Amino acid sequence: MSEILNVEMLSRVQFAVVAGLHILFPPLTIGLSLIIFFLEASWVRTKDLFYLQHTKFWMRIFVLNFGIGVVSGIPMEFLFGVNWGPLSTNNGAFLGNLLGFEAVLAFMLEAAFLSIMVFGWTRVPPKAHLAATGIVTFAATLSAFWIMSASSWMQTPSGITLVNDKIVISDYLAAIFNPSFPASFLHMEMASIELSLFVTGGISAWYILKGRNTDFFLRLLKISLTALILVAPLQVLLGDWEGQNIAHHQPAKLAATEAHWNTNPPGTGASWSLLAWPNRETQSNDWSIEIPYVLSLLIHHDPKASVIGLREFPREDQPPVLIPYYTFRIMMAIGFFFAGLALWTGWLWWRGRLDMTHAPRQRWLWRAWILSIPLAYLAVESGWFLREVGRQPWVIYGIMRTEHAYSQIPLQSLIWSLGSYALLYTTLIVIGFYFARRILREGPDLDTPIKTFSGSHKPSAELAHRTQGS
């Protein structure tokens, strides 16, 4: 019990709760803003009312998600100052700057132009409104840029000099563009887009399953699927790049992620375990299902290359194994499910069964798309836990241990604050679900003319008839 009820562990649990629940919102803000920009740009270019109606509908989801994401992120700033005082004292000059850049250069830009995006439809010309949407999209990505830079620097600190055991940034650009940053940032950006495409596709499937505005959402689902066919392979390549990066800069993290205990001699090849039960006490797996040569092939693109085992590192420097190992496999399993879903849907589309006549009969397909929404969030959460837990026992890899980074605050205060944060975030999520459900139950308004700066856009009778579905 003392292993759990101590200040260090509860500080870590508290940060995990706050960060783990906050991460539910920014990826959708990043990806959905890009989708909305595409829809609005398509409307400006083609004047097809379909794009304008979708832009207006998804903007309601975006604003709700953005608002809750902002509120859920504020406590993280307090956690750095209160729970992680030594970390902030030693590294605040750099990490504080990056978080400040994120607030000033990204969040304020995003918030300023969001008002035009939401309220400017009748006040600014369409191209100016599109520009505002584009700036919001850019700012959302810029926000991810600074956050991922700070997170990556803690994984692979660079551009620094140690002066009296304190970290001093000697090369600012090298610190910002640290070794793990490019792959991590692009991998996270692509994960955000992928999650958002499954959200738009899954919600579209829900409407199709309900028989509401079938044609309207079937067309959007096809757009989401087309984008996924382009995004998914790119995400696999970025994941491979990040894996190479971890193997080079954080070999203990890589070994823990694969439950690879013993370095294989050169020329023998390391097996990849499909499933295993890692045992930290015995420094081995109690059981495992292994595929020969695959780990060497994945890590070094050479089936007989040597892969460093976890036993090469002192026990006190080894990360936990169970969480990184299984979160990585959860991500992989979800990725295979997504690939199968995309192939299934693409095959039906190719066979001409995704039209108004056949689509309502594909009920299991639409249920699978709806299931893809929580699975996409689970994949993001798994990736985040793998990233952060795999870095342990270091808070700044190789330089500052987690046990030296937390504040010595009373245990009772920590228990109360943990309970308060859990209550706060539960409330936020319940509120988010309530309003999201309300927006989805109301659905898009396809009958009322949409007023913009360029005039009132009324749907044709033919379009209104088609979008009402079966």
Image (tube, rainbow, N blue to C red):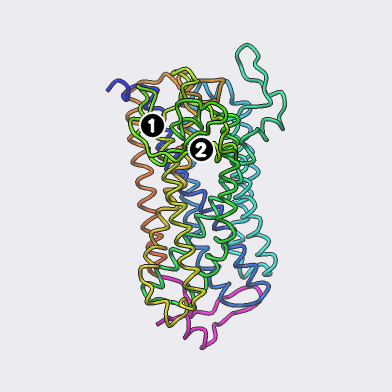
Residue 366 can be seen in this image? yes
The residue stretch that appears in magenta: 443-470
- At mark 2, the secondary structure is helix
Return the x and y of residue 336 as percentages of the image width and height: 45, 53
User: Does label 1 or label 2 sit earlier along the sequence?
Assistant: 1
Q: Label 2: how many residues lie within 10 Å, few (<14), some (14-19) or many (20+)?
A: many
- Residue furthest left in the image: 1
At 60% from the left and 79% from the top, the residue drawn is: 456
Camera-nearest residue between 18 and 256: 256
Residue for badge 2: 295
Return the x and y of residue 39 as percentages of the image width and height: 59, 67
Camera-nearest residue between 384 and 364: 364
The quadrant of the rendering that contains the N terminus is top left
- Residue furthest top in the image: 164
Q: Label 1: how many residues lie within 10 Å, few (<14), some (14-19) or many (20+)?
A: some
Residue for badge 1: 13
Return the x and y of residue 62 as percentages of the image width and height: 51, 58
Residue 154 can be seen in this image? no
Type of residue at label 2? Leu
Return the x and y of residue 459 as percentages of the image width and height: 54, 82
